[in-house]
Image (cartoon, grey):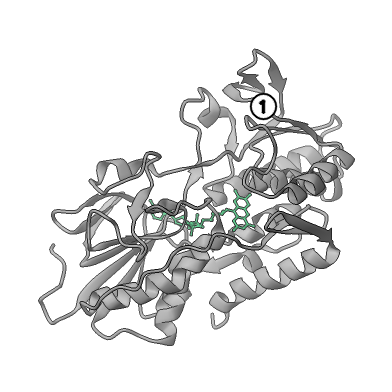
């Protein structure tokens, strides 16, 4: 089935993935519909987790509903068709999105916002014995089982977190809080990173405060130590040492979806979609990408939900313009932005341009911002 362009003047825009940019696109189309453009959202998750609230969900500070965007009603309000399916390829010649176990969908315009997953390739045993933080639904299901197991156990639960970025640190502190307060357990936490320091890409202030907090809470932090193989209950490190664990959270740097490599789209060295400042693929004018999966030419940015959110309005605008054959809008991604990182115990730090402050008021600000963000999408269910 070919796209509908040329027939009835109706164009099919297919949004792949319910990521942060796409929920903003849907919202924009609720506020201002685009006659002549038929939207379809394809997502393997019906409830999209909001990344900023994931550690708070793990800590038990949020209920599931508060931290998830309900995609089906959101799509319905935007006049978009919702297809619950996993995309596993594209046929660019035929203008089709391939779905696992279902018939393909034709597109005239395509937008990809499928995020990333922690990179496990090249680490034998990691897929089998470690628990990656994404996909989030699988992680949360296993986390709840782990909490139950810890609650019924007499010996301390040894939790190893691999990855020293903001996500790894926040998750370690949140998991420790929940294990102690929700499960009444006595966890033994260890955080290992191959990098020279925790929080690469963040300022010295944030590193100092979070390093101190990890120390005060008894989380053992080992930098410059790379896990190279995982066996049941045992992580093997590049220095020849081993670390025993009861549970291993894998929160390393972002890796791109493997199926993109077979699409023929231009990708960067890590396999992310190369887009220009309009968020359009540099190799196919019908294709757009945003969020973690996109790599903006000449302006690479850390993989962070903040950028996905910021790209949403530009993406919505340019999909509308592309549908009407108008020139696209260009925007250089912002360089500096405010980072709010939770410390697990209803505290947080704010870091900006190398400076950082901490306190419960920062957590209250973060909670207010995050709750407000999610409520905007779930408001009229
Ligand atoms: C523990 C942790 C904490 C974090 N905290 C923060 C934070 O506080 N602030 C921040 O800015 N960033 C944070 N991040 C980073 C953040 O998670 C990502 O940068 C962000 O989620 C990327 O958003 P996205 O829109 O690109 O994709 P995502 O939010 O990952 O959404 C992608 C969606 O696409 C769907 N999808 C994926 N593949 C397919 C497919 N093949 N077919 C159909 N659907 C598909 C997924 O199910 C998902 O719903 C954190 C990360 C972690 C691991």
Q: Which residue is mark 1?
A: 224
The percent position of residue 218, horizontal first and vertical second, equals: 86, 36
Kindly identify the residue that appears in the image at 32 percent across and 69 percent down: 40
Which image quadrant for residue 320?
bottom left
Which image quadrant for residue 345?
bottom right
Kindly identify the residue that appears in the image at 28 percent across and 63 percent down: 110
99 over 14 or under it: above or below: above
Towards the viewer: 351 or 56: 351
* Residue 271 visible in the current orientation: yes
The percent position of residue 361, horizontal first and vertical second, equals: 83, 67
- In the drawing, does residue 25 fall left or right of residue 146? left
Towards the viewer: 280 or 114: 280
Residue sitting farthest toward the top: 240
Which image quadrant for residue 373?
bottom right
263 over 247 or under it: above or below: below
- In the drawing, does residue 11 fall left or right of residue 329? left
Q: Crowdedness of circle 1 by 10 Å Cα count: few (<14), some, many (20+)?
A: few
- In the drawing, does residue 153 fall left or right of residue 2? right
Q: Dividing the image into 4 quarters, which one contains the C terminus?
A: bottom right
The percent position of residue 143, horizontal first and vertical second, equals: 67, 45
Kindly identify the residue that appears in the image at 64 percent across and 12 percent down: 240
Q: Give the structural element (helix, strand or loop) at label 1.
A: loop
* Residue 77 visible in the current orientation: no
44 over 246 or under it: above or below: below
Kindly identify the residue that appears in the image at 85 percent across and 40 percent down: 185
The percent position of residue 314, horizontal first and vertical second, equals: 41, 72
């Amino acid at each position: 089935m070919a796209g509908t362009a040329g027939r009835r003047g109706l164009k099919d825009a297919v949004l792949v993935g319910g990521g942060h940019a796409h929920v903003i696109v849907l919202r924009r189309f609720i506020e201002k519909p685009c006659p002549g453009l038929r939207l379809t959202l394809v997502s393997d998750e019906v409830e999209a987790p909001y990344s900023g609230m994931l550690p708070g969900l793990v800590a038990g500070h949020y209920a599931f509903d508060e931290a998830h965007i309900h995609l089906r009603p959101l799509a319905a309000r935007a006049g978009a068709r919702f297809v619950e399916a996993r995309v596993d390829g594209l046929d660019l010649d035929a203008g089709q999105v391939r779905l696992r176990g279902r018939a393909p969908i034709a597109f005239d315009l395509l937008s990809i916002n499928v995020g990333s997953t922690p990179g496990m390739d090249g680490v034998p045993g990691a897929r089998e014995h470690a628990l990656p933080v994404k996909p989030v639904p699988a992680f949360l299901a296993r986390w709840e089982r782990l909490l139950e197991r810890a609650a019924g156990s007499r010996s301390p639960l040894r939790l190893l977190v691999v990855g020293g970025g903001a996500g790894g640190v926040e998750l370690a502190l949140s998991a420790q809080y929940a294990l102690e307060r929700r499960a009444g357990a006595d966890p033994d936490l260890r955080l290992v990173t191959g990098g020279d320091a925790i929080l690469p890409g963040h300022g010295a202030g944030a590193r100092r405060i979070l390093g101190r907090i990890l120390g005060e809470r008894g989380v053992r932090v080992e930098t410059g130590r790379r896990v190279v193989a995982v066996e049941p209950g045992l992580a093997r490190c590049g220095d020849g040492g081993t670390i025993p664990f009861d549970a291993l959270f894998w929160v390393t740097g972002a890796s791109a979806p493997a199926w993109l490599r077979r699409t023929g789209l231009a990708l960067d060295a890590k396999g992310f979609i190369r887009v220009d400042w309009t968020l359009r693929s540099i190799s196919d004018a019908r294709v757009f990408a945003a969020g973690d999966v996109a790599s903006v030419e000449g302006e690479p940015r850390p993989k962070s939900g903040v950028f996905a959110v910021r790209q949403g309005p530009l993406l919505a605008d340019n999909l509308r313009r592309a549908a009407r054959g108008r020139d696209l809008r260009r925007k250089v991604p912002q360089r500096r932005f405010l980072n709010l990182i939770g410390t697990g115990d209803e505290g947080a730090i704010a870091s900006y341009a190398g400076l950082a402050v901490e306190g419960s008021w920062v957590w209250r600000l973060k909670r207010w911002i995050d709750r407000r963000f999610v409520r905007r999408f779930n408001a009229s269910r």
